[in-house]
């Protein structure tokens, strides 16, 4: 049994094997409809239990289709309906019930500590559907999308992140270390990654660079990533923060500093950090990026069940 919580804790070879499997599975599904089952139904009879403490669209839909296409089923729980939040039931007791009824548990949470507590008491795999410090499923899928479009290993590409330091960036940093690609981060100095992340970078990589100058961050990029400047539950002065990021808005001029065939990716939902002209351009691959979540999450599920081909 394997968990999938944070990219930095998963061996690079395992992450690469997940991507290889996802590529094969996507090719094999070209003529199948959404709810048709993969050949062999590798997770037939398995139940994925999902719980969302934060809003979700892409993660919810993609995991639903992922387990269905593998031959299993899914049940989505709302935390406000459970004794865990309403009746004071402990995480330990909740985890034991989940383990008795389900075969895997996907949690989207506002607490990293809660993820670790569930991991401690569950006897089934747990998958992080998003937490304050990590969005591992999103970023592994993004690596898949980059390699699919560019038709080369991500280690040979120059990746840029323009935007706030958040859970997606944390996972992108971990991916840079695992897959050995150059990552240029562009954000105001006040919003650089925290000390723990900077220490992690210092110990593990000489390919990650921080820039206060947005042009330097975008220069020569093969891919430019971004995310909302104001994240879910961001407890800051929103007007002030948006003003701090004015020079980091992704527009046509900024894209001109990247390579001519540079692509734009965004994990969605979008905000004011990107111009419509860029978001709706041919360089933008956000819809392909979103759909690839299904294929990669299928392989993540198989990894957790020890059933990767």
Image (tube, rainbow, N blue to C red):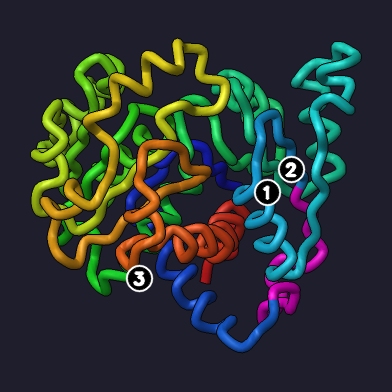
| Residue 155 is a magenta residue | no
Q: Tell me the CA gap for discs 2 and 3.
A: 28 Å
Task: Tell me the quarter of the picture where residue 54 sits.
Answer: top right
| Image x and y of residue 5, in percent | 52, 37
**What secondary structure predominates along the stretch shown in magenta?**
loop
Residue at image mark 1: 60
**Which numbered disc, 1 or 3, marks the residue that appears first in the sequence?**
1
| Image x and y of residue 274, in percent | 36, 43
Q: Tell me the CA gap for discs 2 and 1.
A: 8 Å
Residue at image mark 3: 148
Element marked by disc 3:
helix
Task: Tell me the quarter of the picture where residue 280 sits.
Answer: bottom left
Tell me the residue at 84%/24% (across/down). 80
Local packing at callout 1 (Cα closer than 10 Å; few below 14, some 14-19, many 20+) is some
Tell me the residue at 18%/46% (across/down). 254
Question: Quick check: marks 2 and 1 in contact, CB under 8 Å?
Answer: yes
Q: Which of 238 and 176 is in front in this view?
A: 238
| Image x and y of residue 192, in percent | 25, 21
In the rendered view, would you say 209 is above or below 86?
below
Element marked by disc 2:
strand
Task: Tell me the quarter of the picture where residue 114 sits.
Answer: top right
- Depth check, mark 2 against mark 3: the one in front is 3
Numbered range of the magenta stretch: 34-48
Q: Residue 50 carries which label?
A: 2
**Which numbered disc, 2 or 3, marks the residue that appears first in the sequence?**
2
Question: Quick check: marks 1 and 3 in contact, CB under 8 Å?
Answer: no
């Amino acid at each position: 049994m394997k968990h999938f919580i944070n990219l930095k804790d998963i061996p690079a070879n395992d992450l690469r094997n997940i991507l290889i499997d996802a590529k094969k599975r996507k090719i094999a599904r070209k003529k199948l409809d959404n709810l048709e089952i993969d050949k062999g139904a590798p997770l037939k009879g398995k139940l994925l239990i999902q719980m969302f403490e934060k809003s979700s669209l892409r993660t919810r839909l993609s995991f639903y289709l992922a387990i269905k296409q593998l031959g299993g089923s899914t049940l989505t729980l709302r935390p406000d309906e459970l004794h865990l939040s309403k009746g004071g039931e402990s995480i330990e007791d909740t985890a034991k019930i989940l383990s008795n009824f389900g075969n895997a548990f996907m949690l989207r949470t506002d607490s990293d500590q809660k993820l670790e507590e569930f991991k401690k008491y569950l006897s089934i795999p747990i998958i992080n559907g998003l937490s304050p410090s990590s969005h591992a499923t999103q970023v592994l899928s993004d690596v898949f999308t980059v390699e699919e479009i560019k038709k080369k290993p991500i280690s040979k590409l120059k990746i840029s992140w323009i935007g706030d330091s958040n859970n997606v960036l944390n996972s992108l940093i971990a991916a840079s270390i695992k897959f050995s690609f150059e990552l240029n981060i562009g954000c105001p100095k006040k919003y650089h990654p925290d000390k723990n992340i900077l220490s992690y970078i210092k110990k593990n990589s000489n390919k990650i660079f921080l820039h206060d100058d947005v042009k330097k961050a975008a220069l020569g990029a093969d891919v430019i990533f971004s995310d909302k400047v104001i994240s879910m539950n961001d407890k800051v002065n929103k007007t002030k923060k948006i003003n701090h990021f004015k020079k980091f808005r992704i527009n046509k001029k900024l894209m001109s500093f990247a390579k001519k065939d540079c692509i734009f990716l965004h994990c969605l939902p979008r905000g004011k950090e990107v111009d419509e002209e860029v978001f709706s351009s041919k360089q933008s691959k956000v819809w392909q990026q979103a759909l690839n979540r299904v294929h990669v999450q299928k392989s993540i599920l198989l990894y957790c069940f020890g059933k990767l081909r």
